[in-house]
Image (cartoon, rainbow, N blue to C red):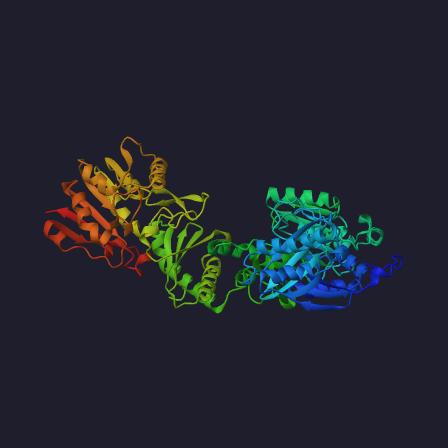
């Protein structure tokens, strides 16, 4: 703002006041510059604060005009607190009659504890008691507590054995400008947004002629930028201030400063800059439009519900600042899914805003690296308690990363992964084409430092990270996973948005059915003439064990005219193959509601009638003990371990496999075959079974070329009656 000599201070108002202005971490320098621009130059930087020596007018200016400050505090006293009595005495020693009347309302905010003041509520109560007793002794009256909008808000800060007591002149956090409804979707606070805009160089006289936010959310960046360009004081809309109930408040001076601020606004029709935003979420755009309306900026800011990649912004070849707060990804898999989004964002910025700049806020350094532009600098900030960095990207030839667009962001390690994936796929190509296989494993920890399995489902890649040994640094392991994932689109010609990432234990047995999401992401794939529903995102496994492809084909070849039993059926893929092979009937048994329903859908998809192809939800042990049916072909692929509440006991495949096989063989026709498999790597078939049955190890024959490298992924036998 421009300093105005018409506001004449009284003698009392020019007395020096020591203030402490708090702000978001990382924006201390921006706040200090703001104060200097207001003519308030007696400052000293601290962590998340700036100390200021000024007068009453300077305090009002800071409250009215600071876009970055969170609170404006006036310390009254600092004293030692090693007992509760010392706290009481320190508060009571202040002449409270200088600051308030006995009939005023107060609120006490206590922050910090020590050995004497063990909780903040006790500290606040002891402070209130001291103030109340101060007035009771002098007037016989005492102030009341009012938490919402008190006449005076008092802050007590305790650190070790020191206490600082201050008046909160702002009254409430100054990020609340008054244009945003409380409870609306608003993860980015107004003063943090304004501080980042100022850090990026946005001002009413800046070089930028347009601001674009491609993921605008509730439009906080856009509104704050417009307020800056229109020179609207951020405190002008606020009705409640902590100083309004302060005894030394000069209402006339405050009103004069507000009048000056109104006169210094820029008329919207005189603006030479534009503000544009998009968001894909209807709820976000609705909130944005409401905030724009409440801020009085209708016609100044344009927001549309659209993906930024498809929206036709009005670029006009003017210097542009892109401000964006994209999603960060709370879980590892979510973060991986955002790799494509960040790359697209960088490509989009380069295509449309050359010679401009982009300020990007994210908590993920790995995601920031996906932007194909080298950042000039970054600022550490906290956004909703989450540690983030704001990266400033100059969109210029000198900062665009070298190499092809596909290779941007690829490290030497990622390039090694690219080479390995391409080599593996080339090796498999003839076999895949000959067998018409579209779902296969292309990588299984071939390079130990990149410990994951990559399965292809059509034009999707499903990545399962194995748990790294404790000796491997967690950050290093995550970086390697990023490198692995970033290599997939280039190596396999798969869209970046079609890469799904999960973290799991190697051969985790009992965890294989665990749900990891709450949505359905299904697709249909084909295998040897059978169709299957697979879900790449919602569960740790997809619904189709690719390593059992040859076993399913074997079942299909053997099933003609057979009565087929599928124990621990999972999604009944083996039953579908049996039906395709001409089985007289199939019966699929599993104790999971989720998977018996999935089995039913798979059978319906392949047009098998429920009359001949039945599904039973039951504990397989109990079902075998109670069944009297006979079958010609049985398939059994039990988990390594299960302690489901639906079971009568606990299944340990090494301990229990003999009993399980004996029960199954009792249901097998004298000329029938039992195919038994499991994925426990250290499993050993009990030799006693060979004394009772004819046992044939078919493990090697049950592995297709895509699993030849990992021959311990399962073991498989055929058992027959002697």
Residue 39 vs residue 521, the one in the foreground? 39
Asked if residue 230 lies left or right of residue 638, the reply is right
Q: Residue at x 49, y 56 (%)?
A: 336
Comparing 198 with 257, the one in front is 257
Looking at the rendering, which quadrant does residue 253 occupy? Answer: bottom right
Indicate left or right for 264 with 161 as reference.
Answer: right
Q: Is residue 177 left or right of residue 414?
A: right
Query: Front-most of 455 and 521?
Result: 521
Nearest the viewer among 593 and 450 is 593
* Image position of 82 (left or right of 69): left
- Residue 235 horizontal/vertical position (percent): 75, 52
Percent x, y of residue 539: 40, 48
> Where does the image place residue 59, in percent across and percent down from the top left?
77, 59
The mark total stands at: 0
Q: Is residue 623 above or below residue 513?
A: above
**Residue drawn at x 56%, y 66% as measured from the top left:** 403
- Quarter where residue 526 is shown: top left
Residue 312 visible in image: no
Quadrant occupied by the N terminus: bottom right
Residue 698 placed where, x, y %? 21, 54
Q: Is residue 441 visible?
A: yes
Question: In the current view of this chain or complex, which residue is farthest to the top?
Answer: 611
Residue 525, image quadrant: top left
């Amino acid at each position: 703002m421009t300093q105005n000599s018409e506001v004449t201070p009284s003698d009392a108002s020019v007395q020096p006041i020591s203030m402490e202005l708090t702000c978001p971490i990382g924006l201390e320098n921006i706040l200090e510059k703001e104060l200097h621009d207001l003519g308030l130059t007696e400052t000293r930087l601290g962590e998340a604060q700036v100390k200021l020596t000024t007068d009453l007018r300077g305090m009002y200016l800071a409250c009215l005009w600071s876009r970055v400050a969170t609170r404006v505090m006036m310390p009254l006293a600092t004293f030692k607190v090693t007992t509760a009595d010392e706290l009481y005495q320190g508060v009571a020693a202040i002449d409270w009659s200088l600051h308030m009347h006995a009939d005023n309302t107060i609120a006490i905010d206590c922050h910090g504890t020590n050995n004497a003041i063990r909780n903040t509520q006790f500290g606040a109560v002891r402070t209130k008691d001291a103030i109340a007793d101060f007035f009771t002794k002098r007037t016989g009256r005492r102030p009341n507590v009012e938490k919402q909008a008190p006449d005076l808000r008092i802050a007590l800060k305790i650190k070790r054995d020191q206490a600082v007591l201050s008046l909160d002149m702002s009254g409430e956090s100054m990020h609340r400008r008054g244009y945003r409804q409380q409870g609306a979707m608003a993860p980015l606070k107004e003063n943090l947004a304004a501080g980042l805009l100022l850090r990026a160089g946005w001002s009413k006289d800046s070089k930028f002629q347009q601001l674009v936010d491609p993921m605008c959310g509730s439009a906080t960046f856009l509104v704050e930028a417009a307020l800056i360009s229109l020179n609207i004081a951020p405190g002008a809309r606020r009705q409640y201030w902590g100083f309004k109930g302060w005894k030394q408040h000069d209402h006339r001076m405050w009103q004069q400063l507000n009048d000056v601020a109104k006169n210094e606004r820029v008329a919207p029709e005189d603006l030479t800059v534009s503000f544009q935003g998009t968001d894909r979420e209807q709820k976000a755009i609705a909130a944005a439009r409401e905030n724009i309306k409440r801020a009085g900026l209708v016609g100044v800011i344009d927001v549309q519900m659209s993906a930024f990649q498809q929206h036709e912004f009005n670029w006009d070849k003017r210097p542009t600042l892109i401000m964006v707060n994209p999603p960060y990804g709370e879980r590892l898999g979510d973060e991986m899914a955002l790799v494509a989004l960040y790359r697209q964002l960088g490509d989009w910025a380069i295509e449309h805003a050359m010679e401009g700049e982009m300020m990007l806020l994210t908590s993920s350094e790995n995601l920031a690296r996906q932007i194909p532009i080298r950042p000039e600098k970054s600022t550490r900030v906290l956004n909703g308690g989450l540690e983030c960095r704001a990266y400033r990207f100059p969109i210029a030839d000198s900062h665009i990363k070298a190499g092809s667009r596909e290779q941007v962001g690829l490290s030497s390690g990622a390039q090694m992964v690219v080479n390995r994936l391409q080599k593996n796929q080339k090796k498999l190509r003839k076999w895949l084409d000959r067998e018409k296989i579209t779902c296969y494993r292309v990588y299984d920890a071939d390079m130990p430092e990149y410990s994951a399995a990559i399965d292809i489902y059509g034009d999707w890649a499903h990545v399962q990270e194995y748990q790294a040994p404790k000796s491997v640094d967690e950050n290093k392991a995550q970086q390697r996973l990023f490198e692995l994932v970033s290599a997939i689109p280039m190596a396999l010609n798969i869209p970046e948005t079609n890469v799904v990432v999960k973290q799991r234990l190697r051969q985790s047995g009992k965890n294989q059915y665990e749900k990891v999401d709450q949505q359905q992401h299904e697709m249909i794939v084909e295998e040897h003439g059978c169709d299957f529903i697979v879900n790449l995102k919602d569960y740790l496994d997809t619904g189709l064990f690719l390593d059992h492809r040859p076993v399913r084909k074997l079942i299909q070849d053997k099933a003609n005219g057979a009565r087929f039993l599928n124990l621990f059926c999972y999604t009944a893929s083996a039953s579908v193959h049996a039906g395709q092979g001409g089985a007289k009937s199939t019966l699929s048994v599993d104790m999971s509601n989720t998977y018996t329903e999935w089995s039913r859908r798979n059978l319906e998809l392949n047009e098998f009638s429920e009359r001949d192809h039945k599904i039973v939800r039951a504990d397989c042990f109990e079902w075998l003990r109670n069944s009297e049916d006979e079958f010609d072909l049985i398939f059994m692929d039990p988990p390594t371990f299960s302690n489901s509440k639906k079971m009568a006991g606990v299944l340990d495949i090494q301990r229990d496999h003999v009993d399980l096989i004996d029960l199954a063989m009792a249901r097998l026709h004298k000329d029938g075959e039992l195919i038994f498999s499991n994925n426990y790597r250290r499993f050993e078939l009990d030799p006693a079974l060979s004394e009772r049955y004819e046992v044939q190890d078919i493990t090697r024959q049950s592995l297709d070329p895509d699993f030849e490298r990992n021959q311990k992924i399962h073991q498989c036998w055929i058992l027959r009656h002697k």
